Image (spheres, helix red, strand yellow):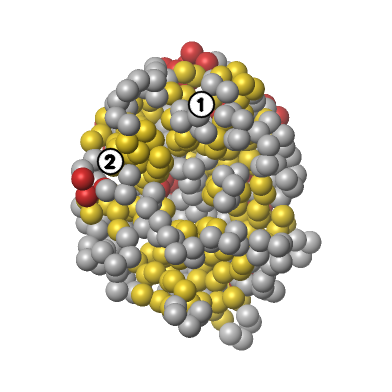
Amino acid sequence: MTRRSVRGAGAAVADSAGEGPGLVAVVVPEPRDAVPLVALQPAGAEVAVVCLEAGAKADRAALDGALATAADRGCRVAGGARVLGAHAAEAAAALLEELRDLDPDRVHTLDPDPVHTGYDQASGTPTYDVPPAHAETAAQALAAARALQRETGRPVFVDCHRAGSDPRFGAAACRRYPVSGSWLSAGFDGRLTAFLPTAAGLVRRFQRVPGGGWSGPELVEGGGPAPGLLVVPDPAGLPQLFALRRTARGDGGVDVEIVHAAQYRTGEPPTPWQSLGGPNAGDWRRGRGVGFPAAAFDGAGNLFVFARNFGHSISYLCRAADGRVTPWRHLGGTRVADELTAVSTSYGGVEVYGRMRDRAGVVRWYPGPDGQWAEDPTLPFAARPGTLAPAAEPGAVLFRDLRTNEARVWRPGAPGPLPLGEADGTGPLTAVPGVELDGWPYTVLLRSGPDGRCAVGAHPEGRPDAGVWWRDLPAASYGPPAAALSRRGLLTVAAAVPGGGLLVAERRPGPAGLDFTAPQLI
């Protein structure tokens, strides 16, 4: 088969205008494992399935049916499944060769560290409801995608499908390694930096001058994390970066740890990744199941980092403003899914929200009057998986209603959530406060639509009850779009597109409205 050529900027612009998010290589052990992953691919995507084994006849038929359905909704299907027929050590080399031939923009695979469903006390070994081949194939797919990116220099994005997730809720609900909508950051000098997690680690692009002249993409060296990213501004507005990192052990196991880095000056490399360990770091078998981190700063500049632990509850550590770091501490209480959101509050504290694991609902943890953490599992809403995010209002959260998909916001003490006038989008919303419209401060909201296209909305700052008006932008996004407000008041929206490029649109100067320039490919 002829190897696909690396596409140039013109093709990327065509993709962003609606021809689809590039080629997606779905890498799985057997055909049946590809069915839910194929169901997640949006219209316009080119889909190629790579299986390590041929699987049963009925499973191959099920995959053929899923590919036919994908074609009916507008995907471009690159033939039937490619079967490698490789085992163990041979699989990694065969998979890399197949990815070289396909030259994908994105690799979609399974969870290399699935959440356990039981624990064998006698052997001290977690048990899972998915076969070991799932994790093994996912790890091999990550390694092959990493090697391909380092060979070509072109970013390869990876989605790992969280075991047990429901594809009916969309791709954001299924990602083991999510990406926050805060990956675009504004520096003190007005220049922007974009941080994008890829197979080979964090890729960065930044403006050489305020308003234009972008660099990169460049790979941030040093202990590349898994392909997910949380970006949290510190009290000075500087981007703090959080991710998970997988490191192979000599005994055949793998250590999974939370890592942190920071960028203090635009254009200069971020600090090296620093390990924060994890709630169960003393036992690699338990520690590899750590959830993706959430983080926030309190009013005194102390950093709180939260993660789901092996027992399916929440653990946290605190790095004080003077640099001292506490051990990981368990909150206990309600069991949570791998989806936490931390927020800074108006009273100067930090709170954390988690989607419940065993029933529909969200639990909130907050500092109680005695200084101890208190739990509130009675919040008046249930969030769709993959949609919890910090709101612009202190202590509040954005989410999509589990039943209706409607975008909503809730703040502590409110009798119920407020609707935000949008139910067609997908994934989490991003909020940017302090945007001046008509001489008044507004909060701008950003989301992806059902076809991947971005949309922006706005409401008076602190008054989501006043109503939100939405308008579409002529740009589709690879994952959540991002927005940043510079210190000069310039609002910029960015979307990642196939080939490692970015589409960037700036709000036009003017007295009112949300009028943006045409998206520019960089």
Task: Inspect the image, locate mark 1, and give the three-letter code of the amino acid beneath it.
Answer: Leu
Question: In the displayed structure, does residue 151 sit left or right of residue 1?
Answer: right
Residue lying at 34% horizontally and 74% vertically, measured from the top left: 377
Question: Is residue 152 placed above or below 25 in the rendered structure?
Answer: above
Which is more foreground, mark 1 or mark 2?
Answer: 2
Q: Residue at (70%, 58%) from the top-left corner?
A: 275
Q: Give the amino acid at mark 2.
A: His
Give the answer, above or below, for where 129 lies relative to 447.
below
Q: Left or right: where does residue 260 sit relative to residue 354? A: right
Q: Which mark is residue 368?
A: none
Residue 494 lies, in percent from the top left, at 46, 30
Query: Residue tagged by mark 2?
Result: 459
Q: CA distance from mark 1 to mark 2?
A: 27 Å
User: Do the numbered discs 1 and 2 sit on residues whose CB atoms are within 8 Å?
Assistant: no
For label 2, the SS is strand
x%, y% of residue 522?
A: 54, 20
State whether residue 299 appears in this view: yes
Question: Residue at coordinates 56% horizontally, 81% vertically from top-left?
Answer: 120
Q: Is residue 147 visible?
A: no
| Label 1: how many Cα within 10 Å (few below 14, some 14–19, many 20+) | many
Residue found farthest to the top: 10
x, y percent for residue 237: 57, 44
Q: Tell me where residue 388 sits by quadrant.
A: bottom left
Label number found at residue 502 = 1
**In this orientation, which residue lies closer to the viewer: 37 or 243?**
243
Q: Residue at x 52, y 33 (%)?
A: 487
Given residues 134 and 194, the one toward you in this image is 194
Q: Nearer the viewer, residue 96 or 426?
A: 426
Along the viewing direction, whichever of 43 and 484 lies nearer the viewer = 484
